[in-house]
Amino acid sequence: MIRSWRSFRQVRHHSPRFLALSLTYAAERAVVLAVILIAVLSGAQPGRVGELEIALAAGSFGATVGPLGTTTALMHERFRSRQANITLAIAIGTGGGFIIGSLLAIQLGLIGMLAGGLFGIGLSWNRVAQNRMRVEGPRDNVGVTIPLLAGFAVVMTLVWVLDGATADIAPLAVCAGGLAALVSMSRLLRPRLKTGRAQFGEMMRFGIPLSLGAIAFWVVASADRYLIGWMMDLEAVGVYAPLYRVSMLFSGAAATLVVWWRAESLRLGATWAGDRLRRFVSLALPLTLAGALLTWWPLTRFLAGIVDHPDAEIAAVVGWLLISVVAWTVASGLLVPMVAASEVKDPAVVWIVAAAANVGLNLLLIPAFGLPGAAAATAAAQAVAVLQGYRAVQRLRSRTSTRE
C-alpha cells in the first residue's frame, strides 16, 4: 500500500491530463449507456430493450473491425502526422462499421440491421476522433468530447419533440455525436498535419494484429448478450443490458488509469521499463478493488429500482461485473506497453485465449445460473486475460534481455 501511495504521488502532477483523458474515455460509454438507460426509463418492453442492446453490440463490433486497427494506429508516433492516414481511417471505419454492424444484427431483421449499421458508423467516427485526440493534450481531448455529447443529446431530444421511440432515434443520435466529434477533430488538427501519402501497408501490418485482439476483446465484453439471447430470450437480454451498462460506469472511472498509462507508454515508446509497469499495477489494483467495494451496493440499489428482476440476482450480476472491471484494468495495464513497443501479436493472443474461455464458460454457466452465470463468465475471462498478460510480459522481458 505504501508503494501505491508513492505511485499516486508520482502521477498526481498529471491531474489535468488525467481528468481530460477520463472525460474522453467516458464519453462514448456515456452515450452507449444513455441509449439503453433512456429506453428502460421511458418504459420500453424488455424485449425491445434486448433488440436495441443486440443492435448496439453489433455496431460496436462494426466499429472495432471496420477501422482494421487504423484507429489505434493513429495514436502511434509513426502514423500521427499525415492527413492521409486520418482520411484512410475515417473511410475504412465508415464503410466497415456500417457493413459489419448491419450483418451482425441480421437476426433482428432489416430495421435492426439498419440500426446496427448506423451504430457502427457513429461509433467508428467517435473512435477515430477520440483515439486521435487523446495524444494531443487536455484541451483537445475536451474539444472532441463536448461536441460528441452535445450532438447525441440534441438528436435524442427529438424523441420528445416528435413523440418518437428512443430505440428508433438512438442510432441517428450516435451518428450525430460521432460526426460532431469528427468535425471538431478536423478543425483542431488542420494547422498541425503534414501532407503525404497514406502509409496503408505499414498501418495494416501494425493494425491487423491489434484488430484481432480488439475482436477477441469484443467477444469477452459482448458475447454474453448474444448467448443469453440464444439460450434464454431477448427479454432476458433486455434485463441484462441495463445491469451491464450501468455497472460499466465503474469501468469508465477505472479506464482513467488505463488511458493515462496508455498515453505514458506511447510517450515512452519501446524504452518502457519493468518498474514502471509494476508501479501501474501497484496503483491500479488497490484503487479499483476499493472502488468496486464502494460502488457495488449503490449500483445494485439503483438497478433494483428500475429493473423488474430479483434483487439477489441483480446484486450477483453487478458484483461479478465489477470484479471483471478490476481484472480488465490490470490486464489492460499489462498489455499497453507492448503496443507502445510495437509488440502487437502477444496482446492479440491474450485476448483470443480470454475470448475462448468466455464463450466456453458462458455455455456452461448461463444454463446453470442464468444472468449471474453470464456475469461470472465475463469476470473469469478477464482473470484469464490477467494471467495470459503476465506471461506475455515475461516473454517480452526475456526477448528484450536477449537482444541486449
Image (spheres, grey):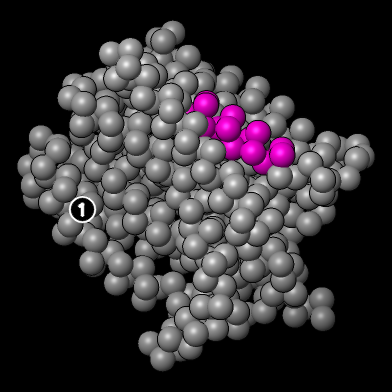
Residue 280 horizontal/vertical position (percent): 52, 75
- Is 28 a magenta residue? no
Question: Which residue bears the numbered disc 1?
Answer: 299
Residue 43 at least partly seen = yes
Q: Quadrant of residue 169?
A: top left
For the N terminus, the quadrant is bottom left
Tell me: 54 left or right of 73: left
The residue sitting at 71% across, 38% down in the picture is 186
Outermost residue toward the front in this view: 161
* Vertical order, 124 against 326 (above or below): above
Question: Principal SS element in the magenta part?
Answer: helix
Q: Quadrant of residue 337?
A: bottom right
For the C terminus, the quadrant is bottom right
Q: Quadrant of residue 31?
A: top left
Identified by mark 1, the residue type is: Leu
* Vertical order, 183 against 397 (above or below): above
Q: Which of 159/218 is in front?
A: 159
Q: Which residues fall within the magenta stretch?
A: 174-187
The total of numbered circles placed on residues is 1
